[in-house]
Image (tube, helix red, strand yellow):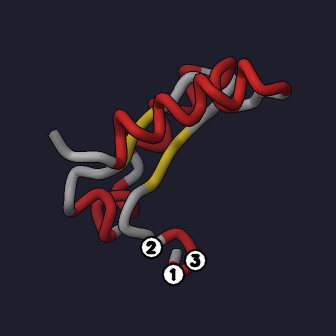
Amino acid sequence: MNKYDADILFVLSESKDATLSFFQNPLLSTLKAAKNHRVYEVQIDRWWTYGFLGVNKLLDDLFKYLLES
């Protein structure tokens, strides 16, 4: 788990069941990102992308999650 102990964690999965299972895992609460409420589920179709239009959507999301208002 040490390699996942980041300040911010983005979770993407093709399956809602897998994502739900991840968020219900008690180990998640031991991570620094979870303790600081910085674990985000992101849309796979926006983050698994190619081309400049797709990358622009991903960058928009990063600004939304990383910059505090």
Does the CB distance between marks 1 and 2 fall below 8 Å? yes
Q: Would residue 32 be found to the left or right of residue 35 on screen?
A: right
Marks 1/2: CA–CA distance? 5 Å
Quarter location, residue 33: bottom left
Q: Which mark is residue 3?
A: 3
Does the CB distance between marks 3 and 2 fall below 8 Å? yes
The residue wearing badge 2 is 5
Relative to 47, say whether 33 is above or below. Answer: below
Residue type pointed to by label 2? Asp
Residue type pointed to by label 3? Lys
Residue 42 is situated, as x and y percent measured from the top left of the image, at: 50, 30
| Residue at point 35%, 48% (across, down) | 66
Q: Would residue 21 be found to the left or right of residue 44 on screen?
A: left
Q: Helix, strand, or loop for circle 2?
A: loop
Residue 37 is situated, as x and y percent measured from the top left of the image, at: 22, 51
Does the CB distance between marks 1 and 3 fall below 8 Å? yes
Marks 3/2: CA–CA distance? 6 Å
Marks 1/3: CA–CA distance? 4 Å
The residue wearing badge 1 is 2
